[in-house]
Image (cartoon, coloured by chain):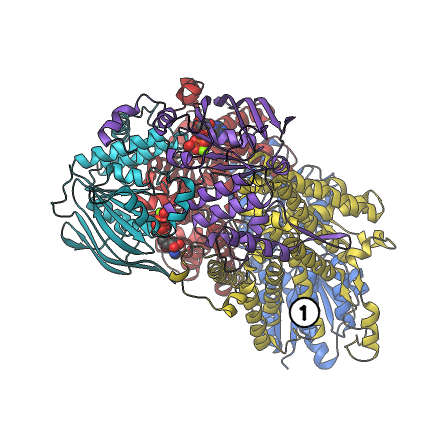
Chain colours: A blue, B red, C cyan, D yellow, E purple
């Protein structure tokens, strides 16, 4: 009892998507009777993240859960932790292959590019030919990969269709509005998270285009689930972050106590949330979903 | 004494030489530029105008505060963090603790203004540069915001403010629109475009003038009158021009500076409240880098970073330039990552122009 | 001309002032009467500026008493002393180069105009009065909006003095107003002092130049290392005695010899 | 003249009063604090020490540049953007264009130093505050970095540098480790812990001293000697203390300032190269806010924001404090959002302490 | 004492200097010979500081010629003129308050010591020389590491002069060195000028004080609004004539009367 695990993410402090994971860690920690520490680079700098992994290893926990935000940057620190005899589970971004190469026990998640591509393919099937990818965090490599994946899924070059929107909601809203005004033939929108989605919903409402344009988003929050219900958003890509936090803690605890662990990696997503299945998701959007 | 050794400067040229000249010229250039390259992209249609007006108004709200503070000889790097903090406080108080929204708003204003006063107090008490003191506040406030919102709500984005604000008397002052009747009427008479289809079919494309714009105008007028037409305005110039000299002739410099820090905090809080009321949510990362953007507007507007010189009208024009350039690039379809490159370039050009103008005014070398 | 039989406007009794470990003033007494020019003389670092700053409310004395028109008084800020009627022109000129002459002139006492419940600064009056006062001092401004930074040092000095006089000071304190001025500008300032004194205002005049002091002074107080060496009345002291007093006396003799006594 | 009116100050106290005193005291306090609250968390085991040493070294590399520049009277807000830019240039040149890595590194250094020179040139030519000029560079460089990397690779992260660098002669100078033989030997003799399993089984937990630490030490020694023991160091102080006065006695102030801007760019480039070589990838968001962190280290280290006063040793101690506090909070398991709150608080306390010390030294009031 | 029969060290011929629309110097000629003290006098804004800055290489003249030891010379920077042997003590003191006395003393000409291929600043020599030179000027420093900010104005002036003299200047330029000084400090500076002059160095001395000028000057050149009013030799001009010249003459008479002629 009382094992100590460290979860290292690549997200900056203020990225709200990670709250679900933080909450799931707390739930899992309580249920299993272990402590889980959540750590992240405050500005989202992956080089800082590598230091945090090293530091986590130095503090000799019973296990490390880490995202493979960038294989290059993290391969050194993660394999060093493995080498030290610390059980490691990788989550969220990165591929199962990378996870294996690092010597991690298993991987829980879904890679960014593939998620974007899946969304793009579905959007294409629903008729999207020209789109806007609202990137609220352009300096983050994962966001660009999502846009790129979506573009490849739709089957058109990304080109100028990625909007560097910034974080400020009024700016996001007005940049989207400006883009749509200047490119009236746009028939698809993909937003990369609540930070971009909420103001985009507002922009579409103001422009009278709500429901007129295909709209997909990553992740969930209250506004998004409302928009899915009223038809503004066609679908949200859900990778079920709760599982990415919860499962590794459970796995590691059992591994530490009884030496048992599933032999294969777990795909937590991609799942699509649409009008059809929103009801059950809605209540917990943003906290556990 | 140097009269006869000095060439005469024409009346016209003298009338032209004002702190806001550079910004005025810049604004004209920028409008001309976008009229040419994005004239038919909808940027200057009603909806397009609303678009960049709102963005500019947002910049203007914080620029007015930053402008007066900068003229008083200080600046505040914590504006951005303060925006995130103020919004989060409103959301926590109203959504989480269930306070009435008007009380949450007023409390948030009170707390922010108190923090502004604390910034000012630290600066005048320790004699440290405001860069350092407010850099510390930047970190402390941002940390507190994230910590507070995670502590109380397990999220860094707190929604549901719109629902909480329904029926509140104070919320529309920040989040509403005015003149909606007029716009509807104009829409009905075909004077302005209406939506052709979709859920809003028949309504005018622009529903009214956003309260944010009203706040921006009100703050600009207030700031301009305060600065140029009142005793206190003279003290602001004096405090920034030479604090010691001002103190000697009886200007209460410390009071002026602290009040300006408080006013800056007030502006940040207006910004945050308008945003929270319009979008219905607060997030811990709101306002990132806004401190720089405010300073950039003010400096483009002709103010002197070292204090004692500047103009609110100039700062407002700076905000307009900033907003128009930012939105114009989207209207014209330029690669959006180049926005920062443009911004940097405009900043440096504007400042060089302003320096030249200021030297002509003051005879400074 | 001198009015030393009147009651003093301001009396400083046994003033001490300490800055941390530095004792700048160690018991100085001094008074100014209406219509007289009282010169404050002394070496560099003797404490002259510190003393007048205490009088003007910039510093609070560590101990000692200030009496204004016979009443014990304690100035909390320069504002207080200004309102009591003490106007000061500081050694480090209290002018703000980037601001206009009119704004500088009125700084701290801006004229106001009521518009409903609001009060605005009356720029029209400010400009007119400034132009008029500067003209009276012999300086023709191009326009009241001219920045002070474009004026010469002598002109700035004049703005500072004109401002002090205009606001009806009872006491005018001048800290080394002539040190950076040319001969003509100096004569101007001395003439102004003379004019001001004749209006019944008490003047405190600090200088290192014996001749300037003798030209306008009615009484002379010499400070040395934070103490008074005594006060002399005009006519009771020769220039040579005064100069010796200012320099501390002894060491000067040798130098004077080699330089022909023309210091 | 005031001798006999001045209390005597003891020899001991005078020996103690140095610019870096505040930082020294701070460092002792911080170590004491973490020894108590995180002593058995592995923070002071070999691996833990390596961890915070490397982080501190990282801060130190940019702090040395920022310190000399600040003493020369300017500062550079574009350091963070420069780090992202330099790394991206190396990655694009080597991975995308297939240049040999050494050539890519040298080119990147050349470009960055040229940009530093341009910053400096703009500052001295226009007489604008460096805050404004380098704020413009901050935006321009970050925009260019994003644009360049998306243009050439359609990503903002560029990997594969490690593969490209295999066998290169220059890459290990930035990304390698020294004393690996010694550590292996110590590991074999059981003096230090070794990995128990996995691909690195049998190797010591700490493979050697990272080149980043070597660079940091080298830059600190270089900066300290330059500043305190050479003619040029005297010029740096003079340029920052009073540029006009220095110019009058023949100090080539403009040259000094431009060189310091170039040196700052050099340090940023060392930082970026070490990072790229160690991790094998460059990303457009590298270095965000590092400019503030560099300034904070320098200011904690006792330098004066307005120039003319400071110490490289102090800045290095500032970097150590920063690194230890940041990593120590992780070791002690504190809520990570509180890190900023701590940082801000430490900053303000350190600066107040330093101000007090400086006043004692210079007799300034 | 005077050595005006020698060839001039530096000769300035018909110097003009314009700053944008302002004509600061409008054809000024001037020379300094070894061992003489040449006083440069004139009203505020007459162009004295601009003139000596041209001589010192701070400004480049718009037109006119500078001859140094008979050779036409063009100084690109203060460094050039310093190296030629022209040392200048500026009106706005060229001292850096936060730096130590020794570092200030050597600023721009730091002594160096070779260690292998590297050259370091020789702090030991710098400290020793500074202490010795300051002692020679009559100032006992506590330690060479003392910050200049802790010195009094007179002491700072002395550091500046000591520095100029030590570096073997051929010409020493002093711009209003006495304006802020007390009587004793002034006497000290004048005595120093006298000492320096006796060593065969040419001194250019700017002042507004006729008596200071007469105390040490061998020749007197008066500037007025950017032009020379002429050069007089010691003994050929009375103090009153000189004063009239400095003030532009006319206007002064009236003032003098009312003030008793003691200006
Ligand atoms: N704020 C202060 N803190 C500490 N010491 C001070 C302060 N102000 C003045 N002093 C010291 O007090 C003494 C008197 O200074 P003061 O400026 O009054 O001299 P002064 O007579 O005006 O000299 P001068 O003729 O050079 O203007 C000096 O030793 C000075 O260093
Ligand atoms: N850099 C400059 N740019 C423009 N005008 C200048 C500059 N420097 C000096 N002037 C002008 O040149 C004239 C001469 O100035 P200067 O400083 O040489 O006078 P001065 O004789 O030294 O006066 P003072 O006795 O007051 O020191 C003045 O009108 C001044 O305003
Ligand atoms: Mg004084
Ligand atoms: Mg001069």
Q: Nearer the viewer, residue A163 or D23?
A: D23
Q: Is mark 1 within 8 Å of ligand 1?
A: no
- Which residue in the protein does label 1 denote? A56
- Classify 10 Å Cα crowding around label 1: few (below 14), some (14-19), many (20 and above): many
Q: Residue C100: horizontal and vertical position, in percent?
A: 36, 32
Q: Can residue C222 be seen in this view?
A: yes
The N terminus of chain C, quarter of image: top left
- In the displayed structure, E228 sits above or below D240; it is above
Q: Residue D109: horizontal and vertical position, in percent?
A: 74, 46
Q: In this view, does C131 lie to the left or right of B29?
A: left
Q: Residue A136: horizontal and vertical position, in percent?
A: 60, 47
Residue at 41% x, 34% y: name it.
E214
Q: Is residue B159 visible?
A: no
- Figure label count: 1
Q: Which of D287 and B122 is in front in this view?
A: B122
Q: Which of D148 and C25 is in front in this view?
A: C25
The C terminus of chain C, quarter of image: top left
- In the displayed structure, C105 sits above or below C246; it is above
Q: Nearer the viewer, residue A248 or B113?
A: B113
Residue at 58% x, 56% y: name it.
D298
Name the image quarter holding residue E183: top left
Write down the chain letter for disc 1. A
Name the image quarter holding residue C88: top left
Disc 1 is placed on an element classified as: helix
Q: In this view, does E192 lie to the left or right of C145?
A: right
Q: Residue A85: horizontal and vertical position, in percent?
A: 76, 75
């Amino acid at each position: 009892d009382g094992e100590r695990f460290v979860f290292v993410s690549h997200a900056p402090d203020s990225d709200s998507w990670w709250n679900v994971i933080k909450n799931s860690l707390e739930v899992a920690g309580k249920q299993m009777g272990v402590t889980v520490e959540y750590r992240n680079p405050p500005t989202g700098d992956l080089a800082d993240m590598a230091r945090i992994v090293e530091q986590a290893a130095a503090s000799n926990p019973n296990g490390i859960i880490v995202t493979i935000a960038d294989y290059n940057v993290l391969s050194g620190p993660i394999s060093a932790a493995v080498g030290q005899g610390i059980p490691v589970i990788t989550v969220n971004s990165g591929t199962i292959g990378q996870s294996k190469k690092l010597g991690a026990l298993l991987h829980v998640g879904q890679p960014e590019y593939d998620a974007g591509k899946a969304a793009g393919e579905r959007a294409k099937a629903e008729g999207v030919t020209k789109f806007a990818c609202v990137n609220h965090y352009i300096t983050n490599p994962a966001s660009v990969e999502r846009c790129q994946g979506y573009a490849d899924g739709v089957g058109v070059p990304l080109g100028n269709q990625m909007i560097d929107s910034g974080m400020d909601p009024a700016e996001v809203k007005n940049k989207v509005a400006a883009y749509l005004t200047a490119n009236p033939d746009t028939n698809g929108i993909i937003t990369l998270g609540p930070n971009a989605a909420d103001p985009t919903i507002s922009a579409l409402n103001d422009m009278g285009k709500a429901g007129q344009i295909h709209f997909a988003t990553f992740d969930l929050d209250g506004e998004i689930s409302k928009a899915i219900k009223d038809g503004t958003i066609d679908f949200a890509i859900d990778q079920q972050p709760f599982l990415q936090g919860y499962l590794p803690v459970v796995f590691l605890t059992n591994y530490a106590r009884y030496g048992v662990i599933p032999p294969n990696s777990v795909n937590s997503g991609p799942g699509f949330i649409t009008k059809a299945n929103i009801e059950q998701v809605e209540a917990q959007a943003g906290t556990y979903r | 004494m140097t009269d006869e050794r000095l060439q005469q400067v024409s009346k016209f040229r003298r009338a032209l030489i004002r702190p806001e000249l550079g910004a005025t010229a810049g604004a004209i250039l920028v409008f001309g530029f976008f009229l040419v390259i994005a004239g038919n992209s909808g940027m200057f249609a009603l909806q397009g105008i609303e678009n960049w007006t709102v963005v500019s108004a947002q910049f203007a709200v914080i620029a007015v505060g930053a402008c007066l503070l900068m003229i008083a000889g200080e600046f505040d790097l914590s504006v951005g963090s303060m925006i995130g903090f103020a919004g989060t406080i409103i959301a926590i108080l109203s959504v989480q603790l269930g306070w009435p929204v008007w009380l949450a708003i007023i409390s948030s204003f009170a707390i922010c203004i108190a923090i502004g006063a604390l910034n000012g107090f630290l600066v005048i008490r320790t004699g440290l540069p405001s860069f350092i003191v407010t850099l510390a506040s930047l970190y402390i406030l941002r940390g507190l915001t994230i910590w507070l919102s995670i502590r109380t709500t397990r999220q860094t984005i707190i929604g549901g403010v719109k629902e909480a604000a329904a029926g509140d008397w104070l919320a529309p002052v920040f989040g509403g629109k005015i003149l909606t009747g007029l716009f509807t009427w104009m829409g009905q008479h075909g004077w302005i475009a209406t939506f052709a289809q979709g859920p809003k079919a028949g309504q005018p494309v622009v529903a009214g003038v956003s309260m944010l714009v009203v706040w921006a105008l009100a703050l600009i007028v207030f700031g301009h009158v305060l600065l140029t037409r009142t005793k206190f305005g003279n003290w602001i110039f004096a405090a920034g021009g030479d604090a010691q000299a001002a103190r000697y002739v009886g200007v209460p410099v410390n009071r002026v500076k602290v009040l300006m820090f408080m006013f800056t905090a007030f502006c940040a809080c207006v910004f945050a409240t308008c945003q929270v009321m319009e979008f219905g949510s607060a997030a811990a990362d709101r306002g990132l880098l806004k401190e720089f953007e405010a300073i950039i507007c003010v400096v483009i507007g002709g103010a002197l970073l070292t204090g004692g010189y500047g103009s609110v009208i100039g700062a407002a024009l700076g905000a307009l330039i900033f907003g128009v350039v930012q939105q114009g690039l989207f209207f014209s379809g330029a690669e959006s990552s180049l926005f920062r490159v443009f911004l940097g370039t405009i900043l440096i050009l504007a400042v060089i122009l302003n320096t030249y103008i200021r030297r002509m005014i003051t005879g400074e070398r | 001309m001198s009015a030393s039989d009147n009651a003093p406007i301001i009396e400083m009794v046994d003033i001490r002032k300490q800055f941390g470990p530095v004792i700048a003033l160690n018991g100085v007494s001094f008074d100014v009467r209406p219509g007289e020019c009282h010169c404050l003389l002394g070496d560099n670092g003797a404490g002259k500026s510190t003393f007048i700053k205490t009088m003007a409310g910039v510093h609070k004395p560590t101990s000692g008493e200030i009496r204004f028109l016979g009443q014990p008084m304690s100035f909390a800020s320069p504002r207080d002393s200004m309102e009591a009627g003490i106007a000061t022109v500081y050694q480090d000129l209290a002018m703000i180069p980037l601001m206009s002459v009119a704004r500088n002139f009125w700084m701290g006492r801006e004229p106001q105009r009521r518009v409903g419940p609001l009060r605005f600064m009356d720029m029209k009056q400010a400009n007119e009065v400034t132009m008029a006062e500067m003209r009276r001092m012999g300086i023709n401004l191009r326009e009241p909006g001219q920045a002070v930074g474009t004026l010469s040092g002598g002109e700035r000095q004049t703005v500072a003095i004109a401002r002090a006089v205009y606001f009806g000071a009872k006491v005018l304190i001048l800290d080394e107003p002539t040190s950076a001025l040319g001969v003509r500008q100096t004569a101007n300032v001395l003439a102004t002092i003379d004019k001001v004194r004749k209006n019944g205002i008490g003047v405190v005049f600090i200088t290192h130049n014996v001749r300037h002091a003798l030209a306008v002074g009615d009484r002379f107080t010499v400070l040395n290392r934070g103490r008074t060496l005594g006060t002399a009345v005009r006519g009771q002291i020769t220039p040579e005695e005064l100069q010796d007093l200012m320099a501390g006396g002894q060491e000067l003799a040798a130098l004077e010899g080699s330089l022909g006594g023309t210091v």
